[in-house]
Image (spheres, helix red, strand yellow):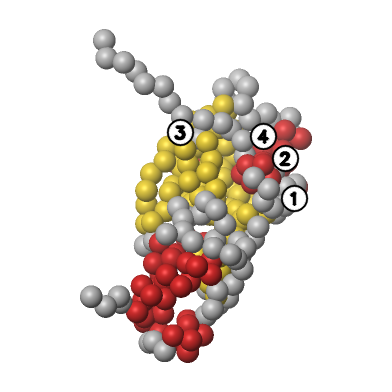
């Protein structure tokens, strides 16, 4: 039985990827078409299989690149994104889309346990590691955290900024779900609409167990994973 051409191309690209460094570019679709004498659809199908396996990632208008190893974060700790990336030898940064102070929605104020229409801090960022988009994140914080708006939220840590303001993150809880990427996700994470995402929603409290931050992080699963440690409750 003859091996389909897209699988042959995929296998050859896997060999090349094995000796390349993270973020090295791969040939464009047009270059693959010329090299292997195939249609653009066949070339794209080969690359798409590599994307699904997390070996490469695409950036709209730029091309296809070798993906770094999947970043794994332990859900059981409160280490922030910046600290997590630095611990893994990666350079964290953020593209700040929004950072302002204004009335919160009913969901935001209810979750943070403040009166309806209370003013809250709203921060919207794309979190990157070595310039690769890892997560699209929206954070809502209580009014006493407003001082963080003067901090460097592009290269600095939000939690470090909170501590500098005397607000100490201490504990929290998170829920993880699987969702499909919407148009905003696709734009900020350089993925296709309806691609699968890992979505973590977490509430963080201070040392007095008072809510200070409610954050939603929408992760690309081919680039980021979440791991939970647990104990087994035995039947009685």
Q: Is residue 219 above or below residue 51?
A: above
Q: CA distance from mark 2 to mark 1?
A: 8 Å
Image disc number at residue 161: 2
Q: Nearer the viewer, mark 3 or mark 1?
A: 3
Q: Earlier in the sequence, mark 2 or mark 1?
A: 1
Distance from Cα at disc 3 to Cα at disc 1: 31 Å
Location of mark 3 (residue): 228
- The residue lying toward the viewer, choosing from 189 and 140, is 189
* C-alpha distance separating marks 2 and 4: 12 Å
**Residue appearing at x 42%, y 71% in the figure:** 10
**191 lies left or right of 139:** left
Contact (Cβ within 8 Å) of mark 2 with mark 1: yes
Q: Position of residue 177 (x, y in %)?
A: 38, 44
The residues tagged by marks 1 and 4 sit, at their Cα atoms, a distance apart of 18 Å
Q: Which SS class for mark 1?
A: loop
Please state which of residues 210 and 83 is positioned toward the viewer in this rendering: 83
Horizontal side of 129 relative to 175 (left or right) equals right
Q: Quadrant of residue 207?
A: top right
Disc 2 is placed on an element classified as: helix
Write the residue at 37% across / 52% down: 179
Corner quadrant of residue 44:
bottom left
Bin the neighbour count of mark 3 within 10 Å (Cα to Cα): few under 14, some 14-19, many 20 and up: few
Q: Is residue 123 visible?
A: yes
Of labels 4 and 3, the one closer to you: 3
């Amino acid at each position: 039985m003859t091996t389909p051409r897209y699988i042959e191309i995929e296998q050859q690209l896997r060999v090349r990827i094995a000796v390349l460094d993270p973020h090295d570019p791969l040939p464009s679709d047009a270059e693959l078409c010329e090299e292997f004498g195939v249609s653009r659809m066949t070339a794209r199908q080969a690359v798409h299989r590599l994307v699904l396996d997390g070996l490469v990632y695409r950036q709209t208008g730029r091309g296809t690149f070798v993906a770094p190893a999947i970043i794994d974060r332990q859900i059981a700790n409160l280490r922030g994104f910046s600290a997590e990336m630095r611990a893994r030898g990666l350079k964290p940064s953020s593209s700040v889309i929004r950072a302002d102070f204004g009335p919160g929605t009913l969901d935001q104020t209810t979750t943070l346990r403040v009166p309806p229409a209370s003013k809250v801090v709203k921060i919207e960022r794309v979190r990157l590691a070595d310039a690769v988009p890892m997560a699209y994140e929206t954070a809502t914080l209580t009014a006493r955290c407003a001082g963080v708006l003067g901090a460097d939220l592009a290269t600095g840590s939000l939690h470090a900024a909170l501590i500098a303001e005397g607000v100490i993150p201490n504990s929290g809880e998170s829920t993880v779900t699987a969702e499909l990427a919407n148009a905003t996700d696709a734009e900020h994470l350089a993925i296709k609409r309806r691609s699968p995402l890992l979505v973590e929603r977490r509430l963080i409290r201070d040392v007095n167990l008072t809510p200070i931050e409610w954050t939603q992080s929408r992760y690309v699963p081919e680039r980021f994973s979440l791991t939970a440690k647990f104990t087994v409750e035995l039947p009685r």
